[in-house]
Amino acid sequence: MVLNKNMRKSALYMAIGIPLALLMAVLVYNLPPVHERLAWRVESLRSQIQYALNPPEQVVFVPQPTSLEPPAASPSPLPTITPTATATQPGPTPTPQATPTPQSTSTPLPVEVILAGITHEYQKWNNCGPANLSMALSYWDWPGTQVDTAAVLKPNPRDKNVMPYEMASFVEEHTGLKAIVRLAGDLELLKALISAGFPVVIEKGFEGANFDGWMGHYEVVSGYDDARERFTVQDSYIMANLPVPYAEMEAAWRAFNYTYIVIYPLERQAEVQAILSEQWDETANYQYAAERASTEIFNSSGRDLYFAWFNRGTSLMYLLDYNGAAAAFDEAFAIYPQIEEKARPWRMMWYQTGPYFAYFFTQRYYDVISLATTTIDTATEPAIEESFYWRARAFYALYELEGKPEYLAHAEEDLRASLEWHPNFGPTLGQMQVLGMVP
C-alpha cells in the first residue's frame, strides 16, 4: 500500500516535472546568449538527420522548356518589380551618374599589398553576409558590427541568404558610403583594387568538413602576395588573415560568376571607375560576363561546366535576354545530374534567382513553380523568401491565365511565407499590393 502511494507520488512528480523541465529548457535555449551559442549546433544536428533521411544531392530539377501561349492580356504589371536587373536577383547596382572618364595607367602593381584597418568578426549563426559587410565597412571607419547590418539585412535571422544587391543597398542607404556590384571579376582586378586601397567583398563557393556539401560564402579580400601566389582574406567562418592560393580563389569564385562588391567614399569614386575601366558600365559588364562564361563553357567539364552555363544564364538575364538565359539555365540543369552526387551544388538556388527571372519572363510558369518547390522542399528550413516570392508570382500568372481560385490561394499563401522569412521584403510587399492583400 505504501509502495503504491509512493509510486503514485513519483508518477505525479514526473507528470509535472518533465513538462516543466522541458519548458525551462526551451526558455533557456531562447535566451539570446544561449541561443547564439547553441542554435548552429541544433540546426546542424537537424540538418544531418534530415539530409541522411532525404539526401538533397539526389534531388534533380528537370526543366520542361515549353512556354505557355501568351494571354489576350498579359498578367498585371507590378509596381515594384519589373523585368530588369534590379528586382530580387539584382546583384549589380545602377551605374552612378556624373562621373569622369576612366583613366588608364601602365604603372605596374606592387608585388605584395596588405591592407590594415579591417576589424575581423567571426560570424554569428547564419550571419555570413552581415558579418562580411560590417568587416568591409570597418575599413572605412564605419562604427557598426554585424548586429547592425543583420538588423536590416536579415530581420529574421533564419533567412538563408543575403543577396549582393541587398548589401550594396545597405551601404548606400545607411552608411554615407557608396558601393558597386559587378560580375566577371578576375585576380588582376582584385589586386588592382587592393593596391589602390579598396578591400573587395567577393561571393564564392565554399566546402568544408563541418557542414554538409557545397554552399555559398562571402569573404573580404584584403591583401595579396605574388611571390607566394596567394590572397589574404578576412574570413568570418574560419579566421582573420586567411591565406588563399590564387588558383583556389579563382576556382571557388567561378560558382558565383566572379561577383564582387567595392565599397568606397564618394570622393574616391573616380579612382574606382578608373580601375574598373570598361567594367564600370553596367551593360558592358554584363556583356563581358556573358562572353567570359561562353569561353569557359568550351574549356570546362563537370561541375565547372555547370557553373559556366549557369553564369551565362545569369549574365544574359541581366541583359534582359530571357530566352537566351532560359536556354543557358536548361543546359546547366541538364549537366547537374552528371555531377558526382557529393559534389553537387544543391544549395545553388538559395543564393541565385536568375532561373526564376528567365523562366517567368518566358512564360514557363510551371518551371518556376517546380524549381521553387524543389528548392524549398530540400531545405531543412525553407527560409528562402525569394523562392516563395517567385512561386507566388508564377501561381498568380496562372491564375490570371486560367482563373482557377486555387492558384490565387497558393499565391497568397506563398507571399505570406515569403514575409515570414524576410519581414518587409520589398518585392513581396509589391506583389501583395497587386493582390489587394494586407501584410
Image (spheres, rainbow, N blue to C red):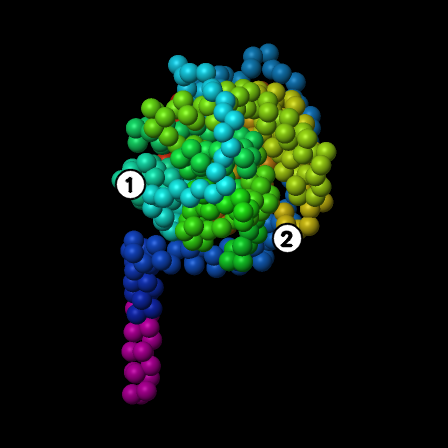
Question: Foreground: 416 or 99?
Answer: 99
Say whether disc 2 or disc 1 marks the residue closer to the N-terminus: 1
Crowding around mark 2 (Cα neighbors within 10 Å: few <14, some 14 to 19, many 20+) is some
Q: Position of residue 46 (x, y in %)?
A: 48, 57
**Quadrant for the C terminus in the image:** top left
Q: Position of residue 394 (x, y in %)?
A: 55, 27
Please report the bounds of the magenta region as a residue range.
Answer: 1-16
Residue tagged 1: 144
Q: Residue 279: tell me if it is visible.
A: yes
Q: Which mark is residue 202?
A: none
Magenta stretch mostly in which secondary structure?
helix
Residue tagged 2: 342
Circle 2 — which element? helix
Distance from the alpha carbon under mark 2 to that under mark 1: 38 Å
Is 3 contained in the magenta span? yes
Q: Which quadrant holds residue 169?
A: top left
Query: In the rendered image of this protein, does residue 147 appear above or below residue 363?
Result: below
Residue at 37 percent across and 37 percent down: it is 153
